[in-house]
Each structure stands twice: as structure tokens, then as C-alpha cells.
Image: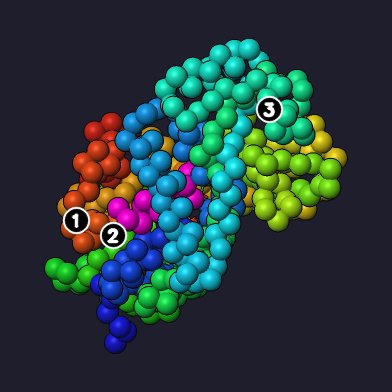
Amino acid sequence: MSKHYDVGIVGGGIIGQSIAYQLAKEGISVLVLDRHKGGSGATSAAAGMLGANSELEQNDAFFQFAKESQRQYHLLQDELSNFSQIHIQLVDKGMYKVALSQEEAIALKNAVQHHETLEWHTRETVLNHEPSVSSEIEGALHIPEDGHVSPKHVCEAFTKSASLLGATFIENAPVQSIKKASVNDYILSTPQGDFTCNKVVIANGVWSGYFFKQLGLPNRMKPVKGECLAVKSNTLHLEKTIFYDHCYIVPKGDGRFVVGATMVEDDWSTTPSLGGIHALIEKVSPLVPGISSAQLISTWAGLRPQSEDGKPYIGVHPEDDNILFATGHYRNGILLAPKTGTMIRDFILKKKIDENYVRAFSVTRNLAQSNEVIV
Ligand SMILES: Cc1cc2nc3c(=O)[nH]c(=O)nc-3n(C[C@H](O)[C@H](O)[C@H](O)COP(=O)(O)OP(=O)(O)OC[C@H]3O[C@@H](n4cnc5c(N)ncnc54)[C@H](O)[C@@H]3O)c2cc1C
């Protein structure tokens, strides 16, 4: 008979690992099962931007949640490094959201009025800070809070810290089914055997659609493939991330520049296409002309887990609060991982959770608009 756990987590990407860390810190016994290696899904493809301001345009519950998560990284970097000796490579030098036309400049200047930390920088100011940026730009929105981390290091730091606190990770263990054995008992079946737990958290990214269906809910998860490339250059110098129309150049501390990312809907392949890489180069070259003569190091692709409305599902099953979902983080799972971890912890510990967040991320929030019904 295998060991029994308080909580079994399906999926060891950044979301599953963040949850495992928060639960292990509370002394809860946790098991994380991953079908491959932890962190090998969308997490391994991400650029690591913490783009609360650049990615989210409405000042709603989702934005507040993202901002809280962004702030949590500042505490986590020391906490995780103390536990694991792994540095998450938080870079806090901000971002430029660039305007190439006057219309784009007007739209970005509007954002300054709604957010007190944002500033409009003229072309001259931008070029003063970032001489590698094209002199053809109109200007840029300066977003001081939107930094970046290394997703790989964050995921490894969560895993190692949670392990040191007693969590168990099993790789190459795809969960094939989740069955209720008794009121407070679930069986997670894998080719490596069955595992039992009191509560289950579904955190397997785009593949979680399968469990939505198995647990009587409509499958709302869609893949949105993203392709990226990385270059090195001795002549290119950037301090801040340069962002334009969903694409970006992120200057990583190790001398690499990560350029991303395409958005290809309903494509389950994880091989980058020539067309996708070409489109990225075309998109970012007018922003930073020197990038086209940089040295190409690698290309890759991953699958973003997209929900119907682009917001994650973080909450309990409508008919069974021992089953929780933490999935659908789409373009922002790295940014949202810390707060997702603490929110799931609070559900499990039955702590008070901001009602706005409970509503915004509820698993049932858009059931009424769907033709599918719970069976
Ligand atoms: C190109 C690209 C760039 C991105 N850039 C950013 C960025 O800059 N900033 C940002 O915040 N976000 C970014 N994202 C989004 C971010 O990567 C995702 O939202 C996030 O990684 C989702 O994490 P996850 O743990 O939910 O999923 P995943 O990382 O996909 O993890 C799911 C895990 O579940 C496992 N699994 C699947 N099925 C099973 C099963 N049956 N049993 C057990 N395990 C299973 C998989 O092996 C995998 O390890 C980007 C994504 C892409 C593709």
C-alpha cells in the first residue's frame, strides 16, 4: 500500500510547484506527480516576464491579483534562496512598452493617467536610457515594476524548497485517472502505481482539460502555442525589457536576449516553425535594429494553457471542495504563480480569501455562457 498524502497535485510546472511549496511550509504532506520532468511544460518555454502592467489593461480583480503576485516575488527571492540556495534571477529594471506610431503613443499616454507609477518617455529619453532602441520610435511607456525572473530557476527553487520541507515529487508518473475512494479519499492512478490523498489539485496546464471532463465539467482549455528565440550579441545593450504588441525582447542577466513570442491557436505541436521565428524577427527588428545581426543561440516553443476568458481557474470543484483547480494561466503563469500558490493554500486551510478573487477565478464563472452542462 503506497503512502497516503494530505494533498496530491497533478502537474509539476511552476503552478504545481508553487502550490507544493506553500503547502509544505504549512506542514501539509504533499505529493506532486508529473508525467515527464517537473517544469518541462509551458514553464520551460516562458520568457519569465512579470508583466502585470504591460500584459493586463483593465484595473480589475485580475490586475490586482497579478500585482500582488508580482510583489510576492520580492519576498520569495530571499525566502527561496535561503531554503534552496537557488537564485530566481529576479531582474527589476523595468520595461519600455514602445509606440511606433502617433496613435500608439496616444493610447499609451492614456495609460499614464490611470496608473501612478507609469511614465511617458519621449524618444530622446528612451534613447538616452537605451541607445540600442531605434530612433524611429515615437516614445515609450516606462513601466518600472515589470521585471523578469528565470522560470527554470523559480521552478527548481520551489521544488527544492518544498522537498526540503517534506514534499514528495515523482516524475514520469502521468496521472491517468482521479477516483473517489471514500468521502475524503482520492486515488490518483499512474503507471507507477496508485497514490491516495485527501485533496487533489489539478495543475497540469493545458492538459488539465482532460480532468475537467473526467470530473464532470466542460473542457475549457485550449493550447496557444508560443515560439521564442534567444540571441547573444557583444554590441547590443539593453537594460529594460522592450515590449511591443505582445512581442518582447528580454535582456537576461547571462548575456542572452530572449525574443518572444508568437501566438498560434489550437496547435498542439511544440516544435518552432520557420515562419514563426521569421515573424518574430520581423516584429522586433524595427524596435531594436541591431538584433538582426546578433548570434542566434536557440529556438523553442511551448503551449500556453488558455481558458475561455484568458483568466486562470483557481478554485474548488462546484460539487466537491476536496478537488481544486489551478490552471489556465495562459500568457502569465510565471507572473501569477506566487499568488496562485497562496490562494490554493488558503482554500485548503479554509482561510479567508478576497471574494473578488474567488469570483474572478471561479471554475464555474462562465458555465452559463457555455452550451455544455455539468453531468
Ligand atoms: C513561449 C511562451 C512564453 C511565455 N512567456 C511568459 C512570460 O514571460 N511570463 C509569464 O508570466 N508567463 C509566460 N508564459 C506562460 C507560462 O509559461 C504559463 O502560463 C505557465 O508556465 C503555466 O504553468 P503550469 O504549471 O500551469 O503549466 P505547465 O508548465 O505546462 O506544467 C504542467 C505540467 O503538468 C504535467 N502534466 C501534464 N499532464 C499530466 C498528467 N496527466 N499527470 C501528471 N502530470 C501531467 C506536464 O508534464 C507539465 O510539467 C509563456 C508561455 C509560452 C509558451
State the CA–CA distance, disc 3 to disc 2: 42 Å
Q: Which residue is situated farthest in the bottom direction here?
A: 1
Which residue is pictured at 46% across the width and 38% down the height?
52
Q: Which stretch did the figure color magenta? A: 331-343
Q: Hey, what amino acid is under mark 2?
A: Arg
Q: Nearer the viewer, residue 230 or 91?
A: 91
State the CA–CA distance, disc 3 to disc 1: 45 Å
Name the front one of labels 3 and 2. Answer: 3
Residues under numbered marks 1 and 2 in contact, where contact means CB atoms less than 8 Å apart: yes
Q: Position of residue 224 (x, y in %)?
A: 53, 42
Q: Hey, what amino acid is under mark 3?
A: Val
Q: Mark 2: which secondary structure? A: helix
- Earlier in the chain: of badge 1 and badge 2, it is 2
**Disc 2: which residue:** 345
Assess mark 3: CB under 8 A from ligand 1? no
Q: Is residue 337 magenta?
A: yes
**Disc 1: which residue:** 351
Mark seen at residue 126? 3
Taking the image as drawn, is residue 50 in sight? yes
Q: Is residue 166 above or below residue 127?
A: below
Which residue is pictured at 79% across the width and 41% down the height?
236
Which residue is pictured at 85% across the width and 40% down the height?
293
Q: Is residue 68 above or below residue 279?
A: below
Main SS type for the magenta part? helix
- Earlier in the chain: of badge 3 and badge 2, it is 3
Q: Position of residue 330 (x, y in %)?
A: 46, 43
Which residue is pictured at 22% across the width and 48% down the height?
353
